Structure formats: structure tokens, C-alpha cells
């Protein structure tokens, strides 16, 4: 492996946001149309379980978790985001990030990870399935972006160790 996985730092956000912009530009990665400011991104993600793939000063990709609810009953459920820079897709960066994110999530007591992925994003669907996620449903015409209704495939991964009692 020619890169390492490490915690994301606030000073990484300019590079994280550039990779996020590449994902937005594909039209198949997110409902977002603009990269949020650091303060908004930071507020919408858990303070733990934020990772980046680095090769020296270069950022290859990132992964993070967002809360699904503020209700106490859902404290162990989180939404997954994984983005890989265009120049590094298909090289195993996403696989390494997602594997590290799963391990990190379990270390912090997360028992369910969920992901909402556009059906057209076949690479992301395959990545998540290879990491132990399973399809649990499809939400039709969930949102409209770029004048187009989009369906979302729902996937989840239950921890075999956290919350197994």
C-alpha cells in the first residue's frame, strides 16, 4: 500500500473539500450541489470517525460518519460518506478507507452503519457490499437534483460485536 489512513484534521478540509467537489461533479455521488463551508461540514459529521488516505502531503480520499438522529436510541447508528479523488479511484483507496471506518466505528460503539447510494453509482454499491453492507431497500424519487428525480438504494452493515448482546 502506497498510502496510509489517518484521522482527518481541520486543516485537511481544503483538500477534503476538493475531493468532495469531484464527487459532486460526477452527479452520482450526493444530493449536494455545493461543497459546504468547514463549519457546516464539521457540524453535520460526528467528531470521531473521520479518516483520510494520505500519500505524503497528498490526500487521496476521505471517509466520515454523520449522525442519523439525535434520539438516544439511535446513538449507535451512523451514515457513511466515502469519497476518493478522481485520480485514485479503482486503486483500493475506497476499500481501505471503508475498512478503517468500519473498525473505527466499532471502536466507538457504533452498531449500525447505513449508506444511501444512487443506483447509478455502481462502484460505490460494490464497495459497500464488499465491506459487508447489504441492501435493505430502495427509496424512489427521494430527491430532485439538477432537474432530475433520484432514487436512493439503502444499505446497512450491522456490527457483529457491538450491540450483539
Image: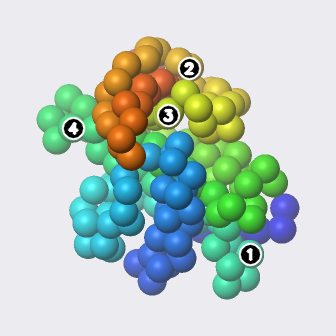
C-alpha separation, residue under disc 4 versus residue under disc 3: 19 Å
Where is residue 17 drawn, in percent x and y? Answer: 47, 70
> Residue at the location (41% across, 31% down)?
150
* Location of residue 125 by image quarter: top right
> Residue at the location (47% across, 24% down)?
153
Q: Earlier in the sequence, mark 1 or mark 3?
A: 1
Task: Give the secondary structure at mark 4.
Answer: loop
Question: Quick check: 159 left or right of 163?
Answer: right
Please identify, in this view, whether the residue under mark 1 or under mark 3 is nearer the observer.
Answer: 3
Q: Is residue 42 above or below residue 114?
A: below
Q: Quadrant of the C terminus?
A: top left
Task: Give the secondary structure at mark 1.
Answer: strand
C-alpha separation, residue under disc 1 versus residue under disc 3: 27 Å
The residue labelled by disc 2 is 134
The residue labelled by disc 3 is 117
Residue contact at pointers 4 and 2, CB within 8 angstroms: no
Q: Earlier in the sequence, mark 2 or mark 1?
A: 1
Residue 55, which numbered label?
Answer: 1
C-alpha separation, residue under disc 4 versus residue under disc 1: 34 Å
C-alpha separation, residue under disc 2 versus residue under disc 1: 31 Å
Where is residue 158 drawn, in percent x and y? Answer: 48, 25
Q: Quadrant of the N terminus?
A: bottom right
> Residue at the location (38% across, 65% down)?
35
* Res. 88 visible in picture: yes
Q: Is residue 143 above or below residue 6?
A: above
Q: Earlier in the sequence, mark 3 or mark 2?
A: 3
Label 4: few (<14), some (14–19) or many (≥20) C-alpha neighbours in 10 Å: few
The residue labelled by disc 4 is 69
Label 1: few (<14), some (14–19) or many (≥20) C-alpha neighbours in 10 Å: few
C-alpha separation, residue under disc 3 versus residue under disc 2: 12 Å
Amino acid at each position: 500500500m502506497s498510502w496510509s489512513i489517518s484521522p482527518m484534521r481541520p486543516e485537511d478540509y481544503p483538500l477534503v473539500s476538493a475531493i468532495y467537489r469531484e464527487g459532486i461533479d460526477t452527479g452520482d455521488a450526493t444530493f449536494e450541489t455545493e461543497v459546504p463551508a468547514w463549519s457546516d461540514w464539521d457540524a453535520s459529521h460526528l467528531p470521531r470517525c473521520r479518516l483520510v488516505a494520505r500519500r505524503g502531503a497528498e490526500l487521496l480520499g476521505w471517509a466520515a460518519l454523520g449522525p442519523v438522529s439525535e434520539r438516544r436510541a439511535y446513538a449507535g447508528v451512523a451514515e457513511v460518506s466515502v469519497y476518493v479523488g478522481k485520480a485514485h479511484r479503482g486503486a483500493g483507496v475506497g476499500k481501505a478507507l471503508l475498512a478503517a471506518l468500519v473498525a473505527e466505528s466499532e471502536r466507538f460503539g457504533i452498531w449500525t452503519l447505513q449508506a444511501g447510494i444512487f443506483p447509478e453509482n455502481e462502484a460505490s454499491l460494490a464497495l459497500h457490499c464488499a465491506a459487508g453492507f447489504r441492501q435493505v431497500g430502495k427509496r424512489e424519487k427521494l430527491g430532485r437534483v439538477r432537474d432530475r428525480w433520484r432514487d436512493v438504494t439503502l444499505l446497512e452493515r450491522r456490527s457483529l460485536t457491538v450491540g450483539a448482546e
